[in-house]
Amino acid sequence: MNEKLCNVALAVPLRTTFTYRVPERLAAEIQPGSRVVVPFRKKSLVGVVTEWAAQGPPDAKLREVQKCLDVIPALTKNLLDLGQWISSYYVAPIGEVYRAMLPPLMELRAQQIVRITELGRSASASLLGEIEAKPALLQKLESANDGVPLQTALRSGVALGDLLKLQRRGLVEILQQIQTRKRRAQRIIAWRSAGTDAPVSSEKEARLRDMLLLQRGALPLTQLLKLGSVSRAVVERLLREGKLEAWEETLDPAEDPFDVGYTPPAHTLNPEQEHAFSAIRARFELGEFGVQLLHGVTGSGKTEIYMRAVQDTLARGKTAIVLVPEIALTLWMGRQCRAWFGARFEGVAVLHSALSDIERAREWWRVRNGEARVIVGTRSAIFAPAEKLGLVIVDEEQESSYKQEETPRYHGRDVAIVRAKLENALALLGSATPSLETFHHARSGKYELLSLAQRVAERSLPTVEILDLREEFRQTHQTSPISSRLQQAIQESLNFQTQALILINRRGYSWSVICRSCGATVQCANCSISMTHHKNRNRLECHYCGSVQPIPKNCYKCDSKYVYFFGEGSEQLEERLRKEFPKARIARLDRDTARTKRQYQETLGAFADGALDILVGTQMLAKGHDFHRVTLVGVISADSSLTMPDFRAAERTFQLMTQVAGRAGRGELPGRVLIQTFYPEHYAIQDAIKQDYVAFCERELHYRQVMAYPPFTSLANVIVRDSNLEKAITWSRELSQFLAPHNGEGIRVLGPASAPLARLKTEYRFQFLLKSKRKAQLTKILSSVLAYCDKKEIPQTAVLVDMDPLQLL
Ligand code: ADP
Ligand code: ZN
Ligand code: ZN
């Protein structure tokens, strides 16, 4: 008998696939890309069929596939190939790559539906009859617009193989639907006051407060009852007493309450936009793979071009993916897309990690079924199973959030380009400050460059001024984070009833706690990092591992009582501004105040509506928002990003300054930007003042070339880590012996050295940095590193391999 075998990728940390027998009863269903249940050791696991196998490993007794979860394979051919590329380029186990690409498993809620297509309806009954579809089934299919459950169809006697033949000829379609309950708004409960010092009358209350304020943030009522083990009556009482507050929130991405009545502005494109758009259309006409960089200054109307590019793609019968760097921006971009395309094309799907598993599965399958043809999402949305993909947009392509910082450590933008290539699609990268890598490719002609040099409607770019903090200190002998010039500018903005954004790079109240007597600083017990003082929450927190400590009264080392809190964070800045401008309406936006989608939106909404005068916050402020009454942007200090021990520090600083400056003067009123710094001569600051992106890039590229850094050299970061210092050292030494002979053959090996973050979450960390002009060579050596670790029995968890790292900490 000719036995059928298939290879299956399983999400186990082994760099191989496994061969299984395909039983006769599953032969019609199983195809490459199908999810299957297979026995593995003593368990059953879900995996993906990668390919047919000619034969299994010699001498192995092969086991059988137990079950097939998909009639239509979950992963398309292109996605299977994309997974292979990711697995080899980022040296990640293939099973873990596919797990990252697949939707959450919702087997119990999944239902398969057979539906007749337009083509099927118009084809004569005889055509369907040819494949022995039973007349009764045919009738049922023709009368049921929503289709017939697959199980019903099979019970009526038709063979699955025959149905699949119809499906392949396009006469019927087989859809996977995720059953969701009728959506109701959820009741969300939050603790009303911000401080933990508000009085509570019982231990139970204190527990609720800590949960809602410190541990979890606002919670759906049902979850609160369960987690807090309190009764509904207690919650109701606290609501009446005003200690808690409640609101309704629909968590359904397709029912965004902000959608109601939203119509996108319909602009006529200006000549620059027109020019860029016609270049995009010309690409579509060619119908082949290409990468374009849309480099447009802030406020130049890039979104308008994205929407038209998507529209054009849809009109050609193709699908489009729009990637944005943050979950918060999916809301806004999703709203744009639904307003533009939702009604006409019925299908915008939103994919990001904050959706519940059911929602994510449902959106994913809507795409797979062809019901949604525009996908908006964060980095993992690049795996949306859209067929006939014509366009991938990567907005703010320089954002580091596109890089996944866990296995598989892929970069969403780079994967987008590879996917576009596999699909013969166009990759459109957009930014006001493209990454140096991307700019380099555009300059060398590898990518096509489209420029928008002007803001829309003849609005001018804001003026950017530097405030030299050394000079300020000489004159005032003060160390206030708000210089007198910034103070004055804020006052003017208040007088004119316009708005101000104040950017500060750190959250919390103070970012360092130091003893004036002996100089000891309070470090995290698990990480080599200072603890941050959070005044509202009345404790110290580690921003890396989340551990907390009480605020010390005395130095832990010398017991002196001169404990000093040093370095302003956003919480302290907000307090100062309130003191300085008691009449102003001020709010703060950072990870501490915007713990839920709703809080984030409320604050931004209030600011957009003019209900706030000053918004203080971290980088969250810098991105995307289109506020029309902001005339002043203040940057408390450019220096914390400039002095990071990282070769990208200058690039990041320039980008951040330009992005945040771009929030000013987007309406009728001109904008002014004030940047405070101790390093006014630094070229990243100088070029940011002139807003001269190209000049900055030329200079920075020169430095990168001389120093052999990306984009001229490829990097890989290898970290050896363990909570036992001895082990970490031994393993680094072993790895060093393995790597040393490779040094010089087109590869440079630096290290081992103590990593900049020498200790993180209780683990000691040592670092190797690998450099090469040829990526392929790096990939090869990385996979041999992993093979060597396997041989030496160095545990997989102890060796972290990062190709094209963005962080070298
Ligand atoms: P960017 O993303 O490039 O910073 P946006 O796409 O947010 O800029 O556009 C900035 C503003 O300009 C938006 O309010 C948008 O509605 C408006 N806009 C876009 N195109 C035009 C145009 N051709 N004429 C007038 N206003 C436009
Ligand atoms: Zn001390
Ligand atoms: Zn820590």
Image (cartoon, grey):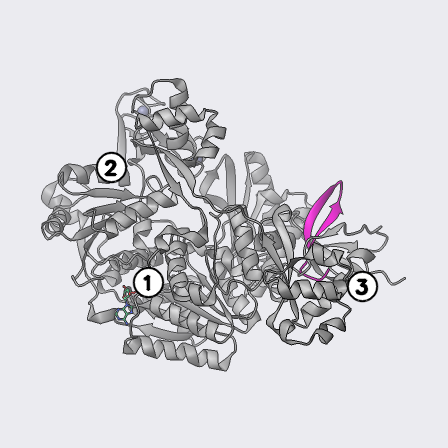
Percent coordinates x, y for residue 59 in the rendering = 86, 53
Q: CA distance from mark 2 to mark 1?
A: 39 Å
Percent coordinates x, y for residue 587 in the rendering = 24, 42
Q: Can you identify the residue that label 3 sits on?
A: 54
Percent coordinates x, y for residue 266 in the rendering = 30, 69
- Could you tell me if the residues under marks 3 and 1 are in contact, i.e. CB atoms within 8 Å? no
Q: Can you identify the residue that label 2 sits on?
A: 572
Percent coordinates x, y for residue 436 in the rendering = 39, 64
Task: State the extent of the magenta-drawn residues as a range.
Answer: 30-48
Secondary element type, mark 2: helix
What is the quadrant of residue 422 in the picture?
A: bottom right
Q: Can you identify the residue that label 1 sits on?
A: 263
**Residue at screen point 51% across, 38% down:** 764
**Residue at screen point 39% across, 32% down:** 212
Label located before the other in sequence (2 or 1): 1
Q: Nearer the viewer, mark 2 or mark 1?
A: 1
Q: Nearer the viewer, mark 3 or mark 1?
A: 1
Residue sticking out furthest to the top: 202
Secondary element type, mark 1: loop
